[in-house]
């Protein structure tokens, strides 16, 4: 399908980064907290650090912090600052990143930023505070794109549930979804969840969706949805709700129906390359936030069949991945 290009990602400069070696006699300190337990992501993150000359136990100390929806964000942020790191690396939760940046200032924070629209960084070319990093979306308009794709797949849809955490539903993400719905003539039913939500809360959320007569579902990839994306897809199938989210893996391997999201295949390496630039002395203001350059539309025709849907050929033609 047609690609959309924004700021050039750091993958283009990956080769250049390897020309710089970490100072052999300096010990670097990294405070790390991310809401992802993916072992492949973790391994690639560490591999990239080693490629750039950073070896844990030799010239690199990594202080790891466990974060989940039940964590005290303020306390974790303060503990990270107390370790006096050269760089703080955090990710996948707008609220947590905001708290860390506030407590850590002026210590550089290199983040996996769920959305620029959250207001964590206002100037992506020259970040004005102590946060830079890699953003997981390329602008709030991604909300409208997802809703439009869902409408193309199910032209009759007029009432769509939106599943999100309270923090983002009440902020820019929720407003963007409401605006996109208004532009497309679709009524949006907000279903916000606490960041601590588990299976019981998600089952109650789907009962609410059914009671409010929603015909389809959009769910973003922000916590706690990220951790529960497989459960969301499963429940959407049980309630016979066509759904779209950021969960490419669930569309490929599970009960997901539609996914439209950036290509995250190079994400661990991009993140480490940003951290490396700070280690080497670059100021946050001189490190542009890296934004996605490639997007993937995936359609699972098996799920469509289970939902009794016939996907328009024009939409299938646009798709990058079609699971049959």
Image (spheres, rainbow, N blue to C red):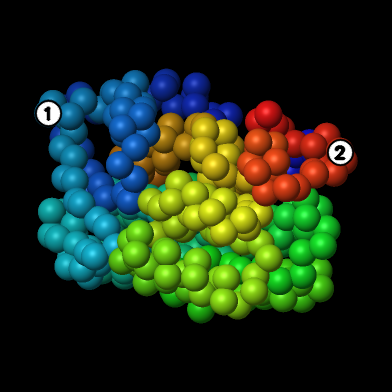
Depth check: give the residue in front, 54 or 294. 294
Callout 1: SS? loop
Q: Residue furthest right?
A: 314
Which mark, residue 57?
Answer: 1
Relative image position of residue 255 (x, y in whole percent): 54, 42
Image x and y of residue 192, in percent: 48, 73
Query: Residue 314, can we see it?
Result: yes
Assess disc 2: are there few (<14), some (14-19) or many (≥20) residues with their C-alpha within 10 Å of its C-alpha. Answer: few
Disc 1 crowd, CA 10 A, few/some/many (<14, 14-19, 20+): few
Quadrant the N terminus occupies: top right
Pick the quarter of the image with the C terminus.
top right
- The part of the image, by quadrant, that contains residue 50 is top left
Query: Under tag 2, what secondary structure?
Result: helix
Residue 292 appears in the picture as rendered: no
Marks 2 and 1: in contact by CB < 8 Å? no
Q: Which residue is mark 2?
A: 313
57 or 160: which is nearer to us?
160
Where 190 falls versus 220 (above or below)?
A: below
Q: Which circle marks residue 217 in the picture?
A: none
Q: Nearer the viewer, mark 1 or mark 2?
A: 2
Estimate the x, y position of residue 32 in percent, counting from the top left: 25, 47
């Amino acid at each position: 399908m047609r690609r959309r290009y924004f700021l050039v990602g750091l993958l283009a400069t990956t080769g250049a980064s390897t020309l710089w070696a970490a100072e052999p006699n300096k010990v670097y300190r990294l405070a790390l907290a991310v809401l992802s337990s993916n072992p492949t992501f973790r391994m690639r993150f560490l591999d990239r650090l080693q490629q750039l000359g950073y070896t844990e136990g030799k010239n690199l100390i990594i202080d790891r912090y466990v974060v989940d929806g039940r964590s005290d964000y303020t306390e974790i942020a303060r503990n990270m600052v107390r370790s006096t790191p050269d760089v703080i690396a955090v990710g996948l939760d707008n609220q947590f990143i905001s708290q860390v940046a506030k407590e850590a200032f002026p210590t550089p924070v290199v983040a996996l930023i769920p959305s620029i629209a959250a207001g964590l960084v206002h100037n992506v070319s020259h970040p004005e505070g102590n946060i830079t990093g890699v953003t997981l979306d390329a602008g709030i308009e991604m909300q409208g794109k997802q809703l439009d794709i869902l409408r193309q797949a199910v032209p009759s849809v007029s009432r769509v549930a939106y599943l999100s955490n309270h923090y983002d539903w009440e902020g820019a993400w929720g407003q963007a979804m409401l605006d996109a719905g208004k532009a497309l003539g679709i009524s949006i039913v907000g279903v916000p969840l606490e960041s601590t939500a588990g299976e019981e809360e998600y089952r109650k959320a789907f009962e609410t969706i059914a009671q409010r007569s929603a015909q389809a579902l959009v769910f973003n990839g922000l916590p706690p949805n990220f951790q529960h994306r497989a459960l969301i897809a499963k429940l959407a199938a049980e309630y016979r709700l066509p759904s779209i989210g950021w969960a490419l893996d669930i569309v490929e391997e599970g009960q997901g129906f539609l996914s439209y999201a950036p290509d995250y295949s190079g994400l661990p390496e991009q993140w480490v390359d940003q951290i490396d630039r700070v280690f080497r002395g670059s100021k946050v203001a001189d490190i542009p936030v890296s934004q996605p350059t490639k997007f993937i539309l995936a359609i699972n025709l098996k799920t469509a069949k289970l939902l009794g849907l016939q996907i328009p050929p024009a939409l299938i033609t646009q798709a990058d991945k079609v699971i049959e």
